[in-house]
Image: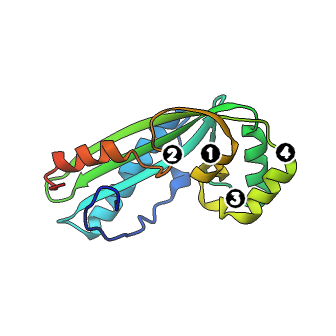
Amino acid sequence: MNLVGVHYETCPAAINEKAIRHDDPAVLTRTLAEAKACKVAAAYPDAVIVSGDAVVALGGRIFEKPRDLDEAAQFLLELSGNEFQFVTAVAVLHAGTQKMLSAVEVSNILFRPLLEREIQNYICAYPVKTFAGAFEDDAVLRFADRVSGSPNIGTAMPVSRLTLMLREVGVEI
């Protein structure tokens, strides 16, 4: 939101994300982002709500946030040497008018083969349990051979698309 240049407050949505399931990562992230926006809108009936979600997808498997460091290491090991998708969704809900906009963007990332010690060093140095796929943007810089598609990796939010959506619901940017 700082990149967009608007004043904002944060409010955790506190939804049960595990209760919302889908095999398609685009549908899953969009549904979660929209559910979070609706939950927050109940407490802020005059606000414009922005929410999002991100997952990593590889070969039909969806990687969300790991439960623990062992699962984080397993995620990175599975992503090692593979091309996968970083899927992000953003939802903008004007609570007063109930106008909901949402979008999904995909980045394709190819990780080079990772050494076990690289994985262990990474999971010990970063709060990997808070990131879909157990990594954030600096891991892309460290581990990726190639990145294509949406430039949303650094923010886990499609910022350019968000700007247009905010304008569409009446936010001056």
Nearest to N terminus: mark 3 or mark 2: 3
Identify the residue under disc 4.
Answer: 115
Side of 65 relative to 122 (left or right)? left
Q: In which quarter of the image is residue 51?
A: bottom left
Image point 79% across, 51% down: which residue?
A: 119
Q: 10 Å neighbourhood of mark 4: few (<14), some, or many (≥20)? A: few
Q: Which mark is residue 153?
A: 2
Q: Distance between the residues labelled 1 and 2?
A: 8 Å
Q: Where is residue 135 in the image (x, y as percent from the top left)?
A: 64, 52
In the image: residue 63, left or right of residue 148: right
Q: Along the polypeptide, which appears first: circle 1 or circle 4? A: 4
Secondary element under disc 4, as helix, strand or loop, is loop
* Residue found at x 72% / y 64%: 125
Amino acid type indicated by mark 3: Arg
Residue on which disc 1 sits: 140
Q: In what element is the residue under mark 1?
A: helix
Q: Which of marks 1 and 3 is in front?
A: 1
Please give the name of the residue rendered at 80% of the width and 42% of the height, measured from the top-left corner: 114
Residue 40 x/y as whole percent? 33, 64
> Does the CB distance between marks 1 and 2 fall below 8 Å?
yes
Quarter of the image that includes the N terminus: bottom left
**On residue 155, which mark appears?**
none
The quarter of the displayed image where residue 38 is located: bottom left
Whole-Å distance between the Cαs marked 4 and 3?
22 Å
For mark 2, give the secondary structure. loop
Question: For the residue marked with disc 4, what is the amino acid?
Answer: Leu
N-terminal of the two: label 1 or label 2?
1
- Label 3 crowding class (10 Å Cα cut-off): few <14, some 14-19, many 20+? few
153 left or right, relative to 160: right
